[in-house]
Image (spheres, grey):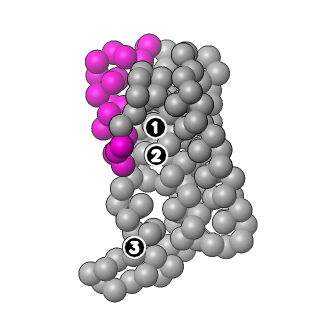
Amino acid sequence: MRVSEETQFRIRLVEGFFEEAHQDFASRRWRSCVDNSQLVAENAAKALLAILGPVGRTHKPAVLLREALDRGHFPEPIGQQVERVAQCAELLGPDVHVQSDYGDEIGRRTPWELFDEADAKQALSIAEDAVRIVKQIVQK
């Protein structure tokens, strides 16, 4: 795979947010773990998009990844891996980003009230998938 400067930049973001997510989990900062895990998944998807060209501003890279898959921009051997990264970015999508930063404004619940250990563990697991897969793809 062609690894552009933008792809390398996104990988560094992924690694940094992933490290912070682990630190947050160890420190029992559930909201922050979810927030950093969301950024891992989003930037992992953007790292794959950067292989194809410049990545615009978006909090929905899963949509763009699937469009690229439909157009055959990723070779078949990695299509399923790209789809899994899209799923990770979707599972930890913009709604999670908004909730982890702003809470539930209608229900008057803060971000710290919304997320518990189980949420953080699940988000971290999804982020781990995204990291593992994007590194496998970029190293090919």
Residue at 63% x, 72% y is: 29
Q: Which residues are magenta?
A: 57-76
Q: Could you say which is closer to the camera, residue 130 or residue 48? A: 48
Q: Residues within 10 Å of mark 2 (few under 14, many from 20)?
A: many
- The three-letter amino acid code for the residue at tag 1 is Ala
- The three-letter amino acid code for the residue at tag 2 is Glu
Q: For the residues marked 3 and 2, what is the alpha-carbon distance in whole angstroms? A: 18 Å
Contact between marks 1 and 3 (CB within 8 A): the answer is no
Query: Height in image: 103 above or below 64?
Result: below
- The three-letter amino acid code for the residue at tag 3 is Tyr
Contact between marks 1 and 2 (CB within 8 A): the answer is yes
Q: Which mark is residue 42?
A: 2
The local secondary structure at tag 2 comes to helix
Q: Is residue 72 magenta?
A: yes
Residue at 65% x, 49% y is: 16
Q: Which residue is mark 1?
A: 45
